[in-house]
Image: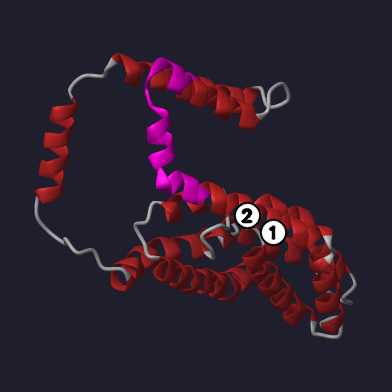
Amino acid sequence: MAVVPVGILLLLLVPLLSYWLCAPEVKAGNEISDWAGKELTKLGALTRNEIILVMMVVTALLLWIFAGSVISGSLVGLLVICGMLLVGIVSWKDILDNHAAWNTFVWFATLVALAGGLSLVGFVNWFGNVVGGQISHFDPLMAMVALVAIFYLLHYFFASVTAHVTALLPVILAAASGIAGLDMQMFVLLLLPTLGFMGILTPYGTGPSPVYYGSGYLPSTLFWRLGAIFGLLFLVAWLVIGLPWLMVIS
């Protein structure tokens, strides 16, 4: 309910803005659907290897969802890869030639380690405490806006939303609680929804982001630029429309 006005606006605005900023080369015609139909015809019925692959994927998903306390998620992935190699679904050369996957692996592993390192050395806590001290004399409403913006933009330093929440949320909440007159319930309602759209900022902001980035569909510069544009749009829309709406309904 709290995000309905902003959600509806962005649902209408984002496709139009995407079309304007990154216009498709093919805007009309049946070429793509015709090509897809021909390719599906060429593929024919499911093969033995494809059926086995589907079974492996479903098994992996079930283990990730229901057996996380029994078996490591990484081990599940490795077992599936080994199974694919043993059955002959893929070859070792296929794995080595999958440059997008290796690119994603290196990006994500490096940036997760970097984000963890920033937390371990105390940088995030130090930064949060400094910022909290600087805005402690602000008007409560302005302090809320400033803290939400800081919390949102600091996602540039994190390679997952979970790491962001773990490292930064307690610091921001502590800083907010020290500001006289600040409504903590309102602040939490304003702060937490940003976790749902801050992943747009970077190619490593959430788990799926490196996969999208690694596909190579968008050049690196364009990916970063679009992330900054849409990230700023989401934040401004949330603060300009979402905050007054929260004040009305709460």
Q: Residue furthest front?
A: 93
Taking 204 as reference, is 230 left or right?
left
Give coordinates of residue 224: x percent, y percent: 47, 69
- Judge by depth and name the residue closer to the eye, 121 or 11: 121
Q: Residues within 10 Å of mark 2 (few under 14, many from 20)?
A: few
> In what element is the residue under mark 1?
helix
Residue 30, relative to residue 114: is it above or below?
above
Give the label on residue 110, or none.
2
Viewer can see residue 168: no
Residue range corresponding to the magenta coloring: 83-104
In magenta segment, residue 96? yes
Taking 93 as reference, is 140 left or right?
right
Q: As shown in the figure, which amino acid type bears the numbered disc 2?
A: Thr
The reply to whether discs 1 and 2 touch (Cβ–Cβ < 8 Å) is yes
Give coordinates of residue 2: x percent, y percent: 60, 59
- Residue drawn at x 16%, y 35% as measured from the top left: 39
- Magenta highlight: main SS: helix
- Residue drawn at x 75%, y 66% as measured from the top left: 187
Location of the C terminus by quadrant is bottom right
Q: As shown in the figure, which amino acid type bears the numbered disc 1?
A: Leu
Q: Which residue is mark 1?
A: 114
- Residue drawn at x 11%, y 35% as measured from the top left: 38
In magenta segment, residue 250? no
> In what element is the residue under mark 2?
helix
Q: Residues within 10 Å of mark 1 (few under 14, many from 20)?
A: some
Location of the N terminus by quadrant is bottom right
- Judge by depth and name the residue closer to the eye, 228 or 216: 216
Residue 73, relative to residue 54: is it above or below?
below
Give coordinates of residue 191: x percent, y percent: 69, 64
Taking 40 as reference, is 8 left or right?
right
